[in-house]
Amino acid sequence: MGRLREFFDAHDGKVSDKWRSYWPAYETVMRRFQKRAVRVLEIGVQNGGSLEIWSKYFPKAHHIIGCDIDPACGTLEFDADNISVVIGDAAEPETYERIDAICDSFDIIIDDGSHHCEHIISAFPHVFERLKVGGVYICEDLHSSYFDAMGGGLERPDSAWAFFRRLSDYVNLEHWHQPGQHETPMRFFEERYGLSLPIEMLAHVHEVRVVNSVCIVEKRAPEDNLLGPREMRGQVAAVNGAILENQDVTARECVQITEADLRLPGKSIERVAHETHWEDIAADHQSNLLALRAEIEQMEIQHQKILDANAAAHQETLRENAVKIAQLDEDLEGCQAALAHADQVREALECELAEAQTTLERSQISQAAKLEHLETVRRDTQARLEAVQASLSWRVTTPLRRLANSLGRSR
């Protein structure tokens, strides 16, 4: 069928995001389901790649449902018909009404949601109730439980890791539980987060397995979680023969547990730690918060003073600029008036120039006509003169004209 890591490495569809060390741990608990018509619920869809990988790894899967609070995940489309996406808060009952409408029980449930401690713990009763007997619950990315921003911390009594550490006590439920106990190991978490974690539910906790950043919880029938009687084989007990008396006795009978031994303290260590340490820290945080708020208020006052001073200076600058702008507007109006007058003068000069040009053109035409007329007269006169000079009478009278000219000069 192939190993889960091989399916991840070969995947080329929607993006899937997992830490490398998860795959061996997942393979250990998931492989037995690979050929079954499993039902898988994963809180936290993101890009939807993990849902596609589960669909390939579990080819006979009946339902693979992703749950996410982001409405954008509802727009994802998948080729596999057995993949569904439900939009809603995994800590809210109404979300599970929508999930139950598709499938109300699951073989594998994976919490890969917000990773905030409160969200992980608040979702657990809802998902564990819907986990089938024989199924496994996996909570991812629990390193966030060490981060203050995620509601965690190494010694924080209400973190997700503290919850799962306390949950491991229910693997050994038969050795400490007695009916009527008020302060059970989970009472603090029930009150802290408003949950219901009845013994009848937690009696199904068969195994709490922890690897780096992952907690795996296996669910089985309560009777399968019992230690059972003590069994012995062999006949020779040379060192401690009394041990033979413990054949088929229970653990309580073996160590002779009394009611006093089973009595739980009035307050769990988580409750004591929260009341004594974390409430003090909360008070310190509140005191620091008040001091910080007072400091912020003083800074806001100083900041407001600076803003007011800057605003006043800005207003004065605006006033001075307004005066300058008014003067510039006045100068502009004068320039515009001078420019308008210049335009009028230019237009008048252009008109005079046009008229002078017309007069000149007309004068040039008239002079040209006169010159042409004079030239015609000159040519006619020249022609007549030449005709006279060429005539016989002109030649006959030539000596007389010379004599007359000579007499005239002698006088």
Image (tube, rainbow, N blue to C red):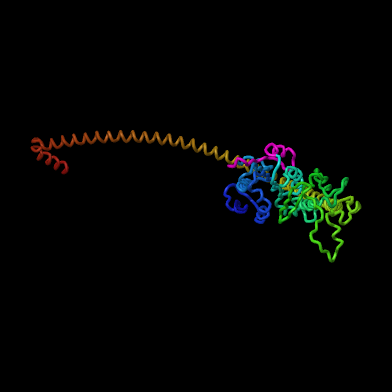
Whether residue 93 is in magenta: the answer is: yes
At a point 80% along the width and 58% down the height, the residue shown is 232
Q: Can residue 114 be seen from the camera position used here? A: no
Relative to 244, does residue 63 appear above or below in the rendering? above
Relative to 66, does residue 22 appear above or below in the rendering? below
* Foreground pick, 125 / 259: 259
Whether residue 264 is in magenta: the answer is: no
- x and y percentages locating residue 185 in the rendered image: 83, 50
Left or right: 34 as drawn, with respect to 251? left
At a point 16% along the width and 41% down the height, the residue shown is 408
Q: Can residue 357 be seen from the camera position used here? A: yes
Q: Where's the C terminus, which quadrant?
A: top left
* Foreground pick, 342 / 65: 65
In the current view of this chain or complex, which residue is farthest to the bottom?
Answer: 239
Tell me the quarter of the picture where residue 319 sits: top right
At a point 88% along the width and 52% down the height, the residue shown is 262
- x and y percentages locating residue 46 in the rendered image: 65, 46
Left or right: 122 as drawn, with respect to 59? right
Tell me the quarter of the picture where residue 401 sits: top left
- x and y percentages locating residue 152 in the rendered image: 77, 52
- x and y percentages locating residue 186 in the rendered image: 82, 48
Left or right: 94 as drawn, with respect to 7? right
* Foreground pick, 215 / 311: 215
- Marks counted in the figure total 0
Q: Report the span colored magenta.
A: 78-103
